[in-house]
Image: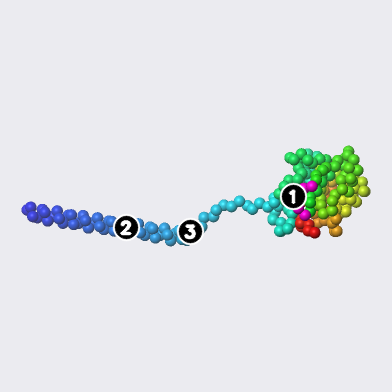
Amino acid sequence: MMMRAGGLLKLAALVSIFFLVVFLAFELLESNMNFKLGKVFARYAPAETVPTRPLRHKCGLSKSCPEDHFAFKITSGAASVVGPKMCFQDNVLMSGVKNNVGRGINIALINGKTGELTKTDSFDMWSGDVNELIKFLKEIEDGSIVMMATFDDPATKLNDEARNLIAELGSSTISILGFRDNWVFVGGKGIKTKSPFEQHIKNNAETNKYEGWPEVLEMEGCIPVKHE
């Protein structure tokens, strides 16, 4: 009886060991399959896209300027409330925030070779003296880039002499600039042709966006660097 019981115990132990080996074998196989499947899925899974910030161009332009060009953006005033804004090479030259704009015609002068700001001023064409504007225009140095933007009324005091001096800077529409018109312009002293950078909108009661004033004008572009 004792020998039969000992044999049964050995048999039970062998059976237990067998099942344990089988269990471990299945566990190892499942683990190996999961690992291989993981590698397969990882290989064919779409790559994670890293969010990127949209590319920003100088002065917030819609696209970058070519090499050897200056970037600019210019905005006219809004009615008699918000002043004009001029940006050049990502630097704000004139704006209401900088507190250097005024009613009438606002002007910034830039060195056409270096891109450095040389002068800013504003001229009241409602109650100011047009001779101050004429003097300023006559003193602009050759090779200067000239940016102009209107605010409120740019034309009541504007006379033919001042208009002709601005036309010599490349303007095509200064001759018809009228009371409370909006106008933005970028030209140059010594320019041989009419500037492509000019926008003008008439003050018209039927089409005005604001009561008594037309809508704001915004213009951007790239100006070639002036070489000798």
Residue 168 place in picture, x, y as percent: 88, 54
Q: Earlier in the sequence, mark 3 or mark 2?
A: 2
Residue 193 place in picture, x, y as percent: 85, 58
Q: Nearer the viewer, residue 23 or 170?
A: 170
Q: Which residues are magenta?
A: 113-118
Residue 88: which numbered mark, if any? 1
Residue at image location 40% in from the left, 60% down from the top: 37
Please, what is the three-letter code of the amino acid marked with disc 2?
Leu
- Label 3 sits on residue: 45
Q: Quadrant of residue 101?
A: top right
Q: Quadrant of the C terminus?
A: bottom right
Element on which disc 1 rests: strand
Whether 97 is among the magenta residues is no
Whether 116 is among the magenta residues is yes
Q: Residues within 10 Å of mark 3 (few under 14, many from 20)?
A: few
Q: Nearer the viewer, residue 20 or 155?
A: 155
Residue 162 visible from this viewpoint: yes
Q: Residue furthest right?
A: 160
Q: CA distance from mark 3 to mark 1?
A: 46 Å
Would you say the magenta stretch is mainly helix, strand or loop? loop
Please, what is the three-letter code of the amino acid marked with disc 1?
Phe
Q: Earlier in the sequence, mark 3 or mark 1?
A: 3
- Label 2 sits on residue: 28
